[in-house]
């Protein structure tokens, strides 16, 4: 029996079975996105707090839509409009939210470890929508789902992750997940953003400095954007980055002919990725978006639906089933 | 008169290790000897206990004036006494900064009024510790400072360090530096390494400290000053200090108990593991333990840095640096160094007494005529440290709930009990 | 939870005869097979629907499509149960609009499963008609739901459970009445 998840804080602490479970459970929700009427009553009466302490459009909309399609209501907190600016602590902000009794909280925050901080103090499920440079687990999951759907498996695939790995929470979640499933992960980017320690993050990781070496024989290429808002040091000139690390159609040819190109978005066409590749036949970005909805619906369904972990023994369900 | 009977006296200054009684008269030690008798004296039975000179903590933060929410001279010294410290040196990063004689005097007066142990203030090197102009060091010396530092920050530039060293040498004061290179520190919150990469926290490379130690050692060579490296945490820094000592420079250093106990692998997102300098790598810790054993390191100092609970209960990035340390220092020294066989008990006591005394240019010994400051402790009493029971106002410690073997049983300052453990029978 | 077998309600042969009779009834009472489709409710409704379609093909040569419906997301009792039940996919490879649907399930009890099934079907389109076919109707309705096609009606008490065991799922073929023993 699978250990029931209480929170989704990161991929690093999940087992392979737990991850497979989530990917499998996303499937019915993928189909659901094709229904004419996309409204369930499954989480009717539940409230999901969407607390984004960092600007985000796509992830916030994805979670909000996922909750709405499951029939839940949402409480929306956006950092710019919040009293955080007035100096209110994270703890107070979150306790204020808690007093309004949501059934779960989806949280994005600029500090690594912030969702864990909240999970230790509140009694409701916490879903990490991105914390600092630590993890972005739902992105890792939707990337894995996209790859698995197209390639049939994750095992043994050659996967290149390009860009500013050091400051990327998406990269860390990808690395943990893909490593657990036996993929061969190659990291590539400017040297100061791909430190040696990344190779020890999980088994099966190597780093190279030349993009051609990363792309050679790749089955999947995950392109990251340059994290300008997270870099404290002077950044790299755009021309430098384009010269050495942009994913162009020519460079892509070194990869396998059916290689997939993934990008967590938003893309800056002309910087980390050539427009022809971004919009080309190998690009999976739109699938990633749809899969993101499916993953998030599956997670909200399992974490926020159902009784709380410490609920009293439920009344016997009046069903004909013997189990 | 106070007679300490039946204890095992360990005095590094005279290399004494034996069953001796110690008679205290007023604020001085009257004499030591076997089977002493003093009919008028109060008797303290130190059977099965070690009797050492009163411990000195070279580095702590008492937060008064200005930050009394976290600690006061009264509560801090009470915690220090429970930790076996008879004297503590408090750093100047208070509010206002202790950069002039009137702040120094206010600290000294307050300590005389409500302090449980001796308080020896350290004055700021620069005004406001801003790293620009020299503070009123001579005036502060008259008011009672024992050393100079801009702790919390490094002494800002090589040029300023030179001025401070020259000036302090003429005044006979040691210069204590919190060694850090600001440009490498840049927003970091823990040691740069595999742990910081995994946790997604901004890292501070080891060289951030050692670069500054190297700088300071060079300037010490230039000026001949007495330089003391505060809370040294890396192998690289230790190498600079060793080389300096070999050269005959008057360079000393201290290490905190948490740096010889924990490493960066212990950090998760618990802010009780966030301090500056940060917990270092295993290699650094092991090198420090070697240095403690072989004499390259002069003292153990706590860097007791209380922060009231609400200020530490935030995201790791935003939490202030620092943990408390008075009440666990001896216990950690016994657990990590003596009980594990890394160094003998006499050496541990040296690190708490004669080592710090040497840095300050004073003596610390159990001998007739010496101040009646003693630390009496057990090496095997088992107990559990609970932050909630600490005498400090703050609770920011990573050792809450840890079981220990060995603890102070009595701290005597100027012939009077500053602390007496409940297990000691009162006559 | 343990169960104790009480008595057999339908044998292997009786199941076969009942399905045969139900298949004929469905065709007769539908005025033919035009627009007819069967929707098997997971889990045991699915093999039943597939068998019905095969039987109908056998005597009328008409191809009645079978869809698979998972009602987990439409249940009304999710918030009182512990961890969420696993969701499986719904596979209905034809349009539901204007269809004459017969929902097939093993047992009709409170009626809540059928209510959930109807909600699920209406999310997919607008059927012309929905009727229900069950192997066993055991009474104790909690909603105004009726089955048009019933294999057998059985009186039961609340502590009892009707187990329709099918070879595709249970490796045996019979309908049992069992007692719940806690």
Image: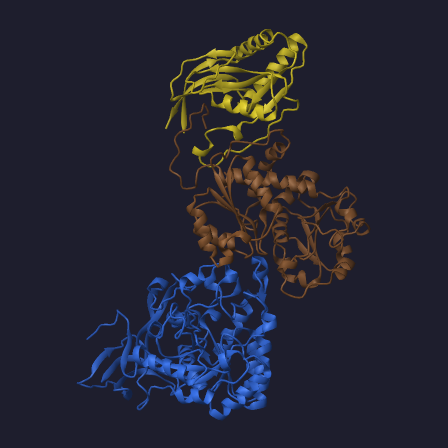
A52 versus B378 height, above or below = above
Give the residue at x 59% y 61%: B194
Instruction: Say which of B319 and B118 sits in front.
Output: B319
**Image position, residue A134 (x, y; %):** 58, 55
Instruction: Say which of A161 and B104 sits in front.
Output: B104
Q: Is residue B384 visible?
A: yes
Residue extending furthest left? B39
Q: Is residue B51 visible?
A: no
- Give the side of residue B393 with respect to residue B151, left or right: left
- Report the chain shown in yellow: C
**Image position, residue B334 (x, y; %):** 40, 71
**Image position, residue A200 (x, y; %):** 62, 58
B82 versus A50 height, above or below = below
Give the residue at x 59% y 83%: B158
Residue extending furthest right? A250
Count of picture labels = 0
Look at chain B in the picture and name its colour.
blue
Look at chain A in the picture and name its colour.
brown
Give the residue at x 34% y 79%: B111
Residue B369's image quarter? bottom left
Give the residue at x 56% y 58%: B199
B387 versus A179 height, above or below = below
Residue C51's image quarter? top right
Instruction: Say which of B1 and B14 sits in front.
Output: B1
Residue B13's image quarter? bottom left
**Image position, residue B357 (x, y; %):** 42, 85
B72 versus A292 height, above or below = below
């Amino acid at each position: 029996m699978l250990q029931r998840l209480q929170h989704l804080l990161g991929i690093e602490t999940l087992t392979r079975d737990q991850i497979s479970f989530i990917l499998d459970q996303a499937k019915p929700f993928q189909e659901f996105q094709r229904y004419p009427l996309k409204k369930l009553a499954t989480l009717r009466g539940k409230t999901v707090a969407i607390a984004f302490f960092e600007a985000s459009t796509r992830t916030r909309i994805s979670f909000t839509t996922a909750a709405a399609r499951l029939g839940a209501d949402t409480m929306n907190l956006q950092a710019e409009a919040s009293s955080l600016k007035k100096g209110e602590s994270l703890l107070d902000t979150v306790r204020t939210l808690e007093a309004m009794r949501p059934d779960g909280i989806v949280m994005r925050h600029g500090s690594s470890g912030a969702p864990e901080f909240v999970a230790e103090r509140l009694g409701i499920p916490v879903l990490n929508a991105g914390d600092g440079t630590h993890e972005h687990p739902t992105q890792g999951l939707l990337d894995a789902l996209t790859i698995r759907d197209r390639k049939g498996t994750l095992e043994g695939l050659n996967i290149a992750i390009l860009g500013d790995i050091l400051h990327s929470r998406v990269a860390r979640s990808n690395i943990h997940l893909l490593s657990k499933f036996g993929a061969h992960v190659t990291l590539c980017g400017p040297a100061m953003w791909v430190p040696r320690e990344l190779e020890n993050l999980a088994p099966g990781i190597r780093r190279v400095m030349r993009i051609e070496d990363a792309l050679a024989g790749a089955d999947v290429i995950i392109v990251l954007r340059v994290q300008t808002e997270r870099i404290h040091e002077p950044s790299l000139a755009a021309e430098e980055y384009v010269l050495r690390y942009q994913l162009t159609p020519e460079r892509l040819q070194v990869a396998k002919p059916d290689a997939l190109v993934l990008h967590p978005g938003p893309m800056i066409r002309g910087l980390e990725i050539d427009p022809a590749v971004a919009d080309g036949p190998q690009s999976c970005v739109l699938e990633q978006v749809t899969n993101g909805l499916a993953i998030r619906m599956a997670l909200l369904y399992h974490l926020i639906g159902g009784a709380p972990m410490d609920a009293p023994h439920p009344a016997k369900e009046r069903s004909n089933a013997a189990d | 008169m106070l007679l300490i009977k039946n204890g095992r006296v360990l005095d590094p200054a005279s290399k004494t290790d034996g069953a001796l009684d110690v008679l205290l008269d007023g604020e001085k030690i009257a004499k030591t000897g076997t089977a002493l008798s003093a009919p008028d004296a109060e008797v303290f039975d130190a059977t099965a206990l070690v009797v050492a000179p009163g411990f000195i903590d070279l580095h702590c933060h008492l937060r008064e004036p200005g930050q009394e929410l976290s600690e006061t001279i009264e509560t801090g010294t009470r915690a220090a006494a429970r930790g076996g410290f008879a004297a503590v040196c408090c750093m100047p990063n208070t509010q206002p900064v202790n950069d002039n004689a009137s702040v120094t005097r206010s600290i000294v007066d307050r300590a005389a009024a409500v302090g449980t142990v001796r308080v020896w203030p350290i004055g700021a090197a620069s005004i406001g510790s801003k790293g620009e102009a020299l503070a009123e060091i001579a005036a502060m010396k008259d008011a009672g400072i024992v050393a100079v530092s801009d702790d919390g920050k490094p002494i800002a530039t090589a040029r300023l360090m030179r001025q401070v060293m020259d000036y302090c040498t003429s005044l006979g004061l040691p210069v204590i530096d919190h060694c850090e290179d600001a440009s490498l520190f840049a927003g970091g919150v823990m040691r740069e390494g595999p742990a910081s990469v995994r946790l997604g926290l901004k890292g501070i490379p080891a060289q951030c400290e050692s670069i500054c130690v190297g700088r300071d050692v060079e300037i010490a060579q230039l000026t001949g000053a007495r330089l003391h490296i505060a809370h040294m945490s890396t192998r690289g820094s230790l190498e600079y200090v060793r080389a300096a000592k070999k050269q005959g420079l008057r360079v000393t250093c201290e290490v905190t108990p948490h740096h010889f106990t924990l490493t960066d692998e212990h950090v998760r997102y618990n802010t009780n593991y966030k301090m500056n300098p940060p917990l270092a790598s295993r290699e650094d810790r092991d090198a420090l333990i070697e240095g403690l054993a072989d004499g390259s390191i002069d003292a153990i100092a706590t860097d007791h840095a209380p922060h009231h609970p609400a200020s530490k209960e935030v995201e790791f990035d935003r939490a202030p640096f620092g943990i408390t340390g008075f009440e666990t220092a001896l216990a950690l020294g016994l657990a990590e160094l003596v009980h594990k066989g890394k160094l003998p008990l006499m050496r541990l006591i040296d690190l708490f007494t004669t080592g710090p005394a040497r840095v300050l240019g004073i003596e610390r010994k159990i001998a007739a005529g010496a101040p009646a400051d003693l630390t009496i402790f057990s090496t095997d009493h088992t107990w559990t440290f609970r932050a909630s029971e600490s005498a400090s106002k703050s609770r920011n410690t990573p050792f809450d709930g840890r079981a220990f073997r060995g603890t102070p049983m009595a701290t005597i300052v100027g012939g009077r009990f500053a602390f007496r453990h409940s297990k000691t029978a009162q006559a | 939870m343990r169960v104790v077998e009480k008595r057999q309600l339908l044998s292997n042969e009786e199941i076969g005869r009942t399905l045969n009779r139900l298949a004929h009834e469905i065709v007769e009472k539908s005025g033919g097979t035009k627009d007819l489709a069967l929707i098997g409710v997971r889990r045991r409704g699915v093999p039943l629907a597939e068998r019905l379609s095969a039987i109908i093909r056998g005597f009328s040569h008409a191809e009645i499509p079978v869809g698979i419906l998972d009602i987990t997301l439409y249940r009304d009792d999710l918030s009182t149960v512990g961890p969420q039940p696993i969701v499986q996919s719904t596979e209905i490879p034809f349009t539901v609009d204007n269809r004459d649907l017969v929902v097939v399930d093993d047992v009709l009890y409170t009626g809540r499963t059928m209510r959930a099934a109807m909600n699920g079907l209406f999310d997919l389109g607008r059927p012309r008609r929905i009727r229900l076919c069950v192997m066993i109707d055991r009474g104790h309705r909690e909603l105004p739901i009726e089955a048009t096609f019933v294999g057998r009606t059985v009186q039961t008490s609340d502590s009892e459970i009707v187990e329709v065991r099918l070879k595709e799922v249970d490796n045996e073929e019979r309908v049992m009445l069992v007692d719940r023993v806690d």
